[in-house]
Structure formats: C-alpha cells, structure tokens
C-alpha cells in the first residue's frame, strides 16, 4: 500500500467514522474501567479492614483480661498475614508510651477504619487498618501496607490498557479495511465515469451482488448511463438522418441549378427550373418546421394552452374532412365515434396528431383499404385509434417508426418529411398519453391513449 | 394602401416592400421596434406588417403598445418557423392575422389584400350574394338561380368564407386556417379535394363559373364580368 493510497484511506469518510467510533468506545470503556477499579479496590480494602478490625477486637479482649502486659505478649511472635502481607500492630498506653508493635505512629488516635499515607524509612507508604482506644486510654491499632489494593488497582489498569489497545487497534484496522473496500468500489465508479468521459458510453459500473446501498447506487448510475447512451444514440441517429435528409434535396437542387446554368435557353425553361427549385426548398423548410415543432412540443412549453374540449366533435369534423380525401384516393372510410367525449388538452395539437395518423393510414395503404376512425372512453382514459386493413407493419419494426426520419421504405423516396409519427409521439408525451401500434390482423391499429385527468 | 413594414432583416424588408410597391401600395420601412412604434403611432397607415423578433422593442410589445394607444390599424404579424406559441400570442396582443416565415409572396399579397378590404367589408350580412348564388347564414341554406344546393358542413363553411371575400384571392393556407382550423401543413390534398367537390355542387351545370383557381396563389370566387 503506497503512502498516497494510505493518505486517501485516512481521509476517507468510512475511516473517519471508524476513528470517531473508536474514541467514543474508548471513552465509555474508560468510564467503565474507572468504576470497576473503584469498586474492586474498595472491596479489597474492606476485606483487609474487616480482618484487622477483628484482630483489634481480639487484642481489646486480651487487654481487658490481662492488661497492657498481656497485649505485649499477644502482639509479639508470629503475626498473622493477609494475602502474604503481614499484619502489623501498634499499642500505645494512656500516657503515650509505645508498648508494642511496629506500625508507624502516624496512625495514632484513628478510631475505626483508616487509610493513612505516611513515610517509613524515607519512602512513602500507605497504610490500611483499624484502630480502637479502650477504657484506660490505651490505643490499639492493626493494619498493613495497602499493597493488596494497589495490586488489584494495577491489575485492573493493566487489563484496561491492554484491552483498550487491542480494541483501538482492531477498530482502526477495521476502519482501514472498510475504507479500502469502499474506496475500491468508489474507485471502480470513478474508473467507469472517466471511461465515459473519454467517450466510451457503453461502460458500466460492475455490481457486487450484495444489494447494499452502494449496489443500489450503482444500479441507478447504470440505469442513468443506459438512458444517456440510448438518448445519445437517438441523437446521433437523428443528426445523421437530418444530414441525409437535407443533403439529398440540396444535392438535387444544386444539380438542377447547374444544369439550368449550362443549358438554359428559354424563359419557359427557366420558370420550370425555378419552380422545381422552390418546391425542393419548400420540402427542406418543411423538415425544419417539423423538427422545430417537435422540439417546441417536447420542451413542454405549451401546457398553458390546455383546456377541456369535445374530442368527439373534433373527430367528427376530421372525419368529414378526410372522408372526402379518402374517397378520392379510393379508400373506404368509416367513423366509430360516440358523441360528447370530453378531453383536457391542447385542441390544436390533438387535432394535428389525429390528422397525422389519419393521413399516414391514407398515404401508406393501397387503394381499397378500409380505414376506421375510432374513439373509446371510460372513467380513466380516452382512446383514439386509426385502424386500417392494409399491409400493416412487421412487429419488430413498430417501435422504430415512432423515431424521427424512420421510414419503412429505406430509399426515402416516399413523400413526407419522416417526422409525422415522431410529432404524434411528442404530442402524446405532452398529454401524458401513450402511442401504441398493434396488429389489426390484417392491417395496423395506431392508438393514442389519453389519461382522463392530466395533473398539473 | 399605405403600409408600414417593421422588419429588421434588410433583405426580407426589401423583398416585401418591392413586391407590395409593384402591387400599387405605398410602403414605409422601419428596421427596429422603436422606429416602428414611432411611425405606427404617428402616420396614418392602412396596414402594419410586424416581425415577431425585432431589436429594441419586440414585435409583440409593439403590437400591444399600438393597440393600447387606441390605434386600430390592421396588423399582420410575421412569426418564425415553427413558432407554435407566436400565433396565439400575436393574436392575443391584437394582431389581425399572422404569417409564418418563410412565405411565398403570393401568400403575403393575399393576406394584405384581405386585411385592406376588411374595413370596407359589410358587417356580417345574414345573406351573402354573388351573382345568382345566395348563402343564408342563419338558415344555413344555399341556392343558385333559385335551385337549392345541399352542402356538407365543411363545404358550407368553405363557401361562406369564399363568398364573404368575393373577388379576393384566398390562399390554401388561409383556407386551412380559417375553414379547417388547421395550423399545420397537411400531407394530403384536403383543400383541393373539398374545393373540387364544392365546385361540382356550385358551378357544375350552370352557365357561368364562380369559383376560379388562381395559379400559384389560391382561389377566388367572383361574379362573371
């Protein structure tokens, strides 16, 4: 692990969290340790005091029966010990003469349990014990150096430091490990985004399969990348198509003008070329108008034009308009529209979408085809459909025809700007409606399904 | 007519002015909104042609200001390609008609004439009469030389539009906008189809044709000379 990498880990969020928790843990551990220490040390001292206090009581009884000389005898010889530490005595008579014992006189006069710090042979010593002054003024004390408590205290402190050290080390190492793991996964996300920045839109962040929060983040990042790639693909496709769609008529235009320049002889000829050029340019302008209209609708700037309108009346009117056109073209045309269906939306745009669908059916089916304009409504939705019994569209191509410039005839010689269905899709999008193409066996049904209430 | 053209693109302004002068109009030009506003408010024009996008005061504001000052001069609004909301906004601001750029000159000329004649057009006659053709707007009946003619809804609206503008050239786009309420270019020959049906009912079998095609411009309904 390089120092740079270590630095990165030390700065990482998960490591900082680990350090924070370690400090908090050690603080609570210290509080606990202090409490344990106090309780244990006091318990040890109480035990010592209990034993020495019973020694003092025994000596008091000896004094009662045998007087001071008895005490001197009782305290000489082999002294009892507690935990290897000898019990020491002090007996002082009523006038202050030391009779027996080697316990430092600093404890003199203490009644009951005591804890005294004094000096003995130039060294500090702590004494724990009990003292008693009996009736004739004789003072009896027993006690010992406080080493038992000190040993306990040291043992507890040692245990605390060792345990804390181990816990801190484990916590910090754990923090490093967790940070490394997290940084590793974040590094993979970094690597993917950098790959994308350099132009490879197909890059995806690998999943760990744990379905944890980073996996979920990864999934939404990948979902976003998927969408971006699709949109970029569409955009590229459209750009290429626009270029193609404009190049072809522009090329034709140039050719016509060039030929006219070289071989123009009469005003009549000039007029013909001029008219051809103008209609060529009009087609180009039509493509631009279509593109701009789609862009404008997609920018959703026209919600303010939304109002309730009678969609039945609109379709009956469109039906009258197109029945005549259909008849001229040798199609059969029928209207299946119940009266009085209302819809909230932009009437002009819905009319354009419906007109586009009807015109598509008229233009892309052979003479003799039956075209039915239908409307169905219930509480939740209004469905407008155009059904023909013509040749239909193969299932695998139905999605594609909604894209701009997509034509089933790849030579692009068919009339139209190739934007009709893309415009319908944009208008549907503005109304939160869906466009569906389905098999009418035989033929095709294109339907626009509007939700009854459009929110917002 | 005395016409003011407020248009910042010099080549478009010249194109419009030249064409209108050839048709016998007097044309002034203003290259920005401020000058346009100044001229429109002061001089007595018969028609204002105003571009949507103008430096200084934009077209919409100009029309609103002019209308706010009580000037009732008809206004033809020029909008840009694909400008869906411009049409509504322009009409709301007080414009009388709109035209999407780029346009054919014949289209502009027809609209200019329509707006110019509007002032002299009789106010909503109940019965429209041209030669021996009569259309009753209330009874919704049509007869020619005393013979009743049965028309469908749209044919009636189409004939009503033509007769109310008798003698004026109406373009295909004007018909689409005003008879069909289509503010887009349909890909089928709606106007031609319905016009030919209407002619079949109104003109066929009678000695004089009333509905005429004007090549490169549109249609006109007029009494035989």
Image (tube, coloured by chain):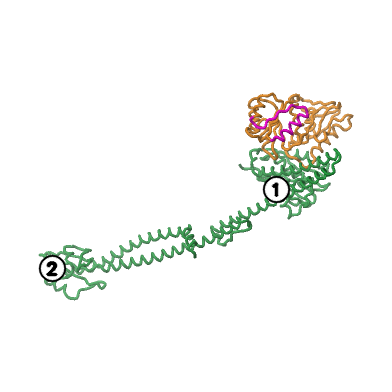
Q: For marks 2 and 1, give the CA distance.
A: 115 Å
Query: In the rendered structure, which disc, 2 or 1, sits on the residue that comes first in sequence?
Result: 2
Q: Which chain is orange?
A: B
User: What SS does tag 2 mark?
Assistant: strand
Q: Which residue is mark 1?
A: A435
Give the x, y percent position of residue B126: 77, 25
What label does residue A373 carry, if any? none
Q: Chain A: give its colour.
A: green
Are the residues flagged by discs 2 and 1 in contact, CB closer than 8 Å? no
Q: Chain of mark 1?
A: A
Is A250 or A222 nearer to us in this picture?
A250
Residue displayed at 74% across by 32% down:
B16
Q: Quadrant of the C terminus of chain A?
A: top right
Give the x, y percent position of residue A328: 83, 41
Q: Is residue B19 magenta?
A: yes
Give the x, y percent position of residue A155: 32, 68
Give the magenta-colored segment's residue range: B9-34
Is A321 or A283 nearer to us in this picture?
A283
What label does residue A98 carry, if any? 2
Residue displayed at 38% across by 64% down:
A164
Does B198 sit above or below residue A70? above
Say left or right for A35 vs A221.
Answer: left
Q: Quadrant of residue A130?
A: bottom left
Q: Residue furthest bottom?
A: A78
Give the x, y percent position of residue A44: 28, 67
Say left or right for A127 vs A297.
Answer: left
Is A253 or A12 nearer to us in this picture?
A253
Q: Residue furthest front?
A: A262
Q: Quadrant of residue B85?
A: top right
Q: Is residue B151 magenta?
A: no
């Amino acid at each position: 692990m390089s120092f740079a990498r270590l630095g990165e880990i030390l700065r990482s969020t998960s490591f900082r969290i680990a350090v924070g928790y370690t400090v908090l843990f050690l603080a609570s551990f210290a509080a606990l340790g202090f409490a344990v220490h106090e309780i244990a040390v006091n318990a040890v001292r109480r035990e010592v005091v209990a034993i020495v206090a019973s020694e003092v009581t025994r000596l008091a009884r000896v004094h009662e029966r045998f007087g001071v000389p008895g005490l001197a005898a009782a305290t000489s010889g082999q002294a009892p010990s507690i935990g290897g530490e000898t019990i020491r005595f002090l007996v002082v008579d009523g006038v202050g003469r030391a009779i027996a014992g080697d316990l430092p006189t600093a404890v003199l006069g203490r009644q009951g349990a005591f804890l005294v710090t004094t000096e003995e042979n130039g060294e500090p010593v702590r004494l724990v014990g009990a003292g008693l002054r009996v009736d004739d003024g004789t003072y009896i004390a027993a006690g010992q150096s406080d080493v038992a408590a000190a040993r306990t205290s040291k043992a507890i402190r040692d245990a605390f430091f060792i345990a804390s050290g181990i816990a801190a080390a484990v916590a910090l190492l754990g923090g490093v490990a967790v940070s490394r793991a997290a940084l590793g996964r974040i590094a993979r996300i970094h690597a993917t985004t950098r790959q994308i920045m350099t132009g490879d839109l197909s890059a995806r962040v690998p999943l760990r399969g744990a379905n944890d929060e980073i996996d979920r983040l990864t999934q939404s990042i990948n979902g976003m990348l998927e969408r971006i790639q699709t949109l970029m693909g569409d955009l590229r496709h459209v750009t290429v198509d626009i270029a193609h769609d404009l190049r072809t008529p522009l090329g034709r235009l140039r050719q016509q003008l060039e030929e006219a320049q070289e071989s123009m002889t009469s005003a009549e000829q000039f007029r013909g070329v001029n008219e051809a050029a103008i209609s060529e340019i009009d087609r180009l302008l039509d493509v631009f108008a279509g593109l701009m209209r789609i862009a404008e609708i997609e920018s959703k700037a026209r919600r303010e034009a939304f109002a309730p309108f009678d969609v039945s009346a609109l379709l009956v009117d469109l039906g009258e308009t197109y029945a005549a056109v259909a008849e001229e073209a040798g199609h059969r045309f029928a209207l299946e529209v119940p009266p009085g269906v209302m819809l909230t939306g932009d009437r002009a745009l819905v009319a354009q979408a419906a007109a586009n669908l009807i015109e598509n059916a008229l233009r892309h089916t052979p003479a003799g085809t039956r075209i039915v304009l239908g409307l169905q409504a219930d509480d939740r939705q209004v469905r407008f459909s155009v059904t023909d019994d013509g040749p239909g569209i193969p299932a695998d191509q139905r999605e594609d025809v909604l894209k701009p410039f997509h034509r089933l005839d790849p030579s692009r010689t068919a009339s139209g700007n190739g934007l009709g269905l893309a415009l319908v899709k944009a208008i549907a999008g503005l109304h939160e409606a869906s466009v569906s193409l389905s098999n009418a066996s035989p033929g095709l049904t294109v339907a626009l399904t509007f939700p009854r209430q459009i929110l917002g | 007519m005395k016409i003011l053209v407020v248009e910042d693109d010099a080549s478009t302004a010249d194109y419009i002015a030249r064409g209108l002068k050839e048709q016998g109009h007097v044309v002034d030009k203003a290259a920005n909104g401020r000058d346009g506003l100044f001229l429109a408010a002061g001089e007595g024009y018969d028609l204002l042609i105003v571009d949507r996008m103008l430096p200084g005061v934009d077209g919409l504001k100009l029309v609103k200001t002019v209308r706010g000052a009580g000037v009732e001069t008809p206004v033809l609004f020029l909008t840009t390609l694909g400008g869906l909301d411009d049409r509504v906004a322009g009409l709301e601001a007080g414009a009388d008609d709109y035209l999407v750029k780029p346009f054919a000159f014949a289209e502009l000329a027809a609209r200019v004439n329509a707006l110019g004649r509007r002032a002299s057009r009789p106010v909503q006659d109940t019965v429209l009469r041209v030669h021996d053709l009569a259309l009753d707007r209330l009874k919704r009946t049509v007869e020619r030389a005393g013979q009743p003619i049965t028309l469908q809804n749209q044919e009636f609206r189409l004939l009503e539009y033509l007769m109310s503008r008798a003698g004026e050239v109406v373009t295909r786009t004007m018909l689409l906008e005003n008879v069909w309420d289509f503010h887009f270019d349909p890909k089928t020959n709606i106007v031609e189809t319905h016009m030919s049906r209407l002619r079949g009912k109104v003109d066929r079998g009678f000695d004089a044709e009333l509905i005429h095609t004007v090549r490169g411009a549109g249609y006109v309904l007029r009494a035989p000379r």
